[in-house]
Amino acid sequence: MDILDASILGVIQGLTEFLPVSSSGHLELGKALLGDHSLPKESMLFTVVLHFATALSTVVIFRKDILEIIKGLFQFQWNESSRFSLKIIISMIPAALVGYFFESQMEVLFGDNIVLVGFMLIVTALLLWLTDKAKSTPKKVSYGNAFVIGVAQAIAILPGISRSGSTIATSVLLGNDKTQAARFSFLMVVPLIFGKIAKDLLDGNVFQSQVDFMSLSVGFLAAFLTGLFACTWMISLVKKSKLKYFSIYCFVVGVIAIILTQV
């Protein structure tokens, strides 16, 4: 993969990680259009690195929230920060289990599986359409809600299902405040991404095949900078109920992806 392709895919990741259109799905579509034929494990590595970049951009945007949560935990008190942290931990359980027990099966899905991406984008479109029609409420995410949202995040491992779209949609459809739903969605993925990177480093998976560090670095930087913009924009869009446009977009792109594979 050359530097230009890596930067294009980085921008795609930075935008689509936060915008509800499936970053993994668009990365697979982008790789197909750019003629990238990486092996599943190499393709998965590039995807993980770009997700790591957007996780860092999330940390920057929500740095005050994260510092407050960490401070609350070290006070060893049962307060709002500790309760929120427990909800984040609960939400991580489904995706962590899927990642641990089905990692090899997931890697196979990240390699020119465009038909699957197309159908999953259509599913994402339906979720976004329903979310946009939901009424805003002041309700906060409960412990039970956190687990259900975590299940949605686990399902969103499939390329084409938007992680932010599915988790925000699930939270809103459960009756939670839209702004809080977006905040919870973006914060809940950060520990998982960091955990995935740490696991790959400890297992040595990163070095099992030839790695183009220049392309990875360029893609990482592009995803990080674009993610800073997209994260802030997405929070505003959810609050103003502007998701129907993304619903239409996902549906159109999904249909086109399916049709092109049949030609």
Image (cartoon, rainbow, N blue to C red):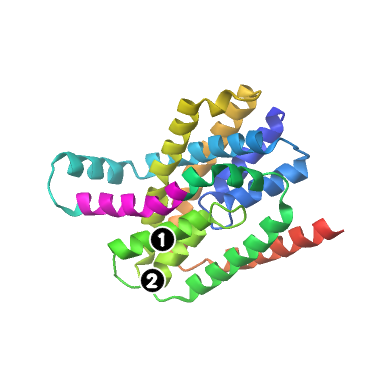
Residue at image coords 49%, 28%: 203
Q: Position of residue 128 (x, y in %)?
A: 53, 67
Q: Position of residue 240 (x, y in %)?
A: 44, 67
Q: Which residue is mark 2?
A: 174
Q: Which residue is mark 1?
A: 149
Q: Amino acid at mark 2?
A: Leu
Q: Is residue 257 visible?
A: yes
Mark 2 crowd level (few <14, some 14–19, many ≥20, 10 Å Cα)? some
> First in sequence: mark 2 or mark 1?
1
**Farthest-out residue, right:** 263
Residue at image coords 67%, 39%: 40
- Mark 1: which secondary structure? helix
Tags 2 and 1 in contact by the CB under 8 Å rule? yes
Q: Quadrant of residue 208?
A: top right
Say if the magenta span includes residue 89.
yes
Q: Position of residue 63 (x, y in %)?
A: 33, 41
Q: CA distance from mark 2 to mark 1?
A: 9 Å
Q: Amino acid at mark 1?
A: Ile
Position of residue 208 relative to residue 242, above or below, is: above
State the extent of the magenta-drawn residues as a range: 81-97
Q: Nearer the viewer, residue 232 or 54?
A: 54
- Mark 2: which secondary structure? loop
